[in-house]
Amino acid sequence: MRQTAKLVVIALTVMGGVMSQAAAQSASSSNPFSGLSRLFGGGGEKPVTTEDGRVLGPPTELQVMVVDGDDDLRDPVRSASLVASALAEDRNTGQDMLAAARGDYARVLGVMYDEGYFSAIINITLDGVEAAGIAPLDAPKYVGKVVIAVDPGPRFKFARAELAPLAPGTRPDPDYAVGETAGTGIIKRATTSAIRDWRDASHAKARVEGQQIIADHNAAALESSVALHPGPPVTFGRLNASGNERLSTRRLLKIAGYPEGRPFDPDELETVRKRLRRAGVFSAITLVEADSLNPDNSMDIDLKVVEQKPRRIGAAFEISNVDGASLSAYWLHRNLLGGGERFRIEAAVSDIKVDGDGRDYSFGMRIDRPATLSPDTTGYIDLQLSEDNEPDYYLRSGSFALGFNYIKSDRLTADIAVAFVRQRINYGSERYDYRVVSLPGKITWDRRDDLKNAKRGFYLQGGATPFKGFSGTGSGAQLTGEARVYRSMLSDDRLTFAARGRAGTVLGPTIIDTPPDYLFFSGGGGSVRGQPFESLGFRVPIPDTTETAYVGGQSLVNASMEARFQVREKIGAVAFLDASQIWDDGAWKGETKWHAGAGVGVRYDTPIGPLRFDVATPIHGNDEDSKVQLYLGLGQAF
């Protein structure tokens, strides 16, 4: 039944149904696939019923059979099958099965062509009767079993593989070559890649001008020739925006940073899309290239956006049996002034304990304005107020900052600001006032595969904050750095090893003259689990008094390691070890202290990140504190 003459593959595509009908005529007398046991089972979940609810029979069964061929073909055949899709949606009447089966001849044949099989024989039977032989109006009321049986025949090789012209400096797909396995999927991939190369070279209207594909069934060989028409070099024309209602068109175009007049580059168009998405104003963004070029070979782009609802609220929590609970909430207004501004108000309360002792409070307001200095630079104004009630000190703090965030890419960002900070801290009967003007800056390089629950990649951040003190406050600089790395193994990356290292130091002033926020405490869920919050610090003498102050160190090194194992689809288990060391002088010099904690935890995946429950215990330091500490929060520890 295989064709033995040279045939154009396009003709074979048209003849697929005819070939299957011929097979159907012989199926009733001698089915060549009967008795074979290479089956890929599966079918519907519900019994087949009539419209009035009467049960006609058990769920329809679907079997996919591959004869004298690669068993790996069964998965793509089933994925392409309309019968499989219908059963998955519980559309299982006889009419549904017949319509889907008749459509599957062409779909399965397309799979064979994509995989390089051009002499395939396909039989699709409904309860033993070839589907191609059943008239559409004679569909059975009930179908108990559908069998898709494929004899793929030999796999073809390329006898000719031509693709021209190619963009300067590029080469065709290496799989598209004489002697390699032939298939329409490979031809499509090679052609798509070549057209993409031309588009990268500013030829936006590159297209296929002609093609000839011939199958030689005697030699199991395929001759393929594809001619491309690159078209002229193209520049970006006008950007025609629509759909924006609250955001002004002038600001929309500035946020987009559209490169009008520059040579066409698909990456530039994707960058425009990313800028608009980062603005946080739109729920949908569509960029469509004009069908035809302007007389000067420029190409206009149509931009259509759909704006999001302007307001959003959110909340988070964390609970520890030692540190108490913490609650936070925020309110966000998008496009506050009609220029894409984001206004955010947030508040938090922590150290919420049963005895009601020493709650901490914070409040912040921030407004971000995208495309302030350039399309990739967001300007912001930030105000933060806080009150910390700790057993060894009482701290009130306020800061005001004007800054800029530069987004080089989704993975690489930089931030710089000028800030004024005022802090007042009470150490018993002694009070200190700190006033500084600082220039905080940081760079972040984030290569994690999933920001909520990373399994591979890394995260790097480095920061420097030079500061000038007033009214007796010291001057100097704070330097910080953080690195995280993630590696996974086993099937489906079920086992993940995660590590985090952090370091920081303050150079310049003495420890008592350093603003408290620039010093480094350790202990608690954010640093060393199993140790109480800020339990690692120094007692230093207060000048001209007999009293001491409990302060953080001027230098810090913190390390955390986790082994995360996915027990089930949504449930994971974690074992972890945390440790920190602090110094009472800058550049990691002077007296040192260290502590460590370890424990285990459970993770439950949610759409907004893993729900985290950890049980930890100290393994070095702070022997007088609780031996077991519990933490409940949202998101991985790092």
Image (cartoon, grey):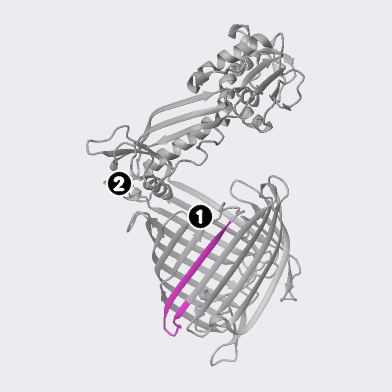
Residue at 37%, 55% (x, y): give it. Answer: 376
Where residue 145 appears, x then y in whole percent?
A: 71, 18
Which stretch did the figure color magenta? 457-477
Residue at 44%, 82% (x, y): give it. Answer: 475
Q: CA distance from mark 1 to mark 2?
A: 43 Å
Where residue 38 appears, x then y in whole percent?
A: 74, 27
Res. 140 in view: no
Residue that mark 1 sits on: 330
Q: Secondary structure at mark 1?
A: strand
Which residue type does callout 1 highlight? Tyr
**Disc sitting over residue 263 in the figure:** 2
Q: Nearer the viewer, residue 211 or 416?
A: 211
**Sequence-wise first label, 1 or 2:** 2
Q: Nearer the viewer, residue 282 or 229?
A: 229
As displayed, is residue 94 above or below residue 9?
A: above
**Does 23 lie within the magenta span?**
no
Q: Nearer the viewer, residue 608 or 446?
A: 446
Judged left or right of residue 272, residue 182 is right
Where residue 481 appears, x then y in whole percent?
A: 53, 70
Residue at 51%, 65% (x, y): give it. Answer: 461
As displayed, is residue 13 above or below residue 168?
A: above
Res. 185 in view: yes
The quadrant of the image that shows the N terminus is: top right
**Does 460 lie within the magenta span?**
yes
Q: Secondary structure at mark 2?
A: loop
Query: What is the magenta segment's predominant secondary structure?
Result: strand
The quadrant of the image that shows the C terminus is: bottom right
Mark 1 vs 2: CB contact within 8 A? no
Which residue type does callout 2 highlight? Pro
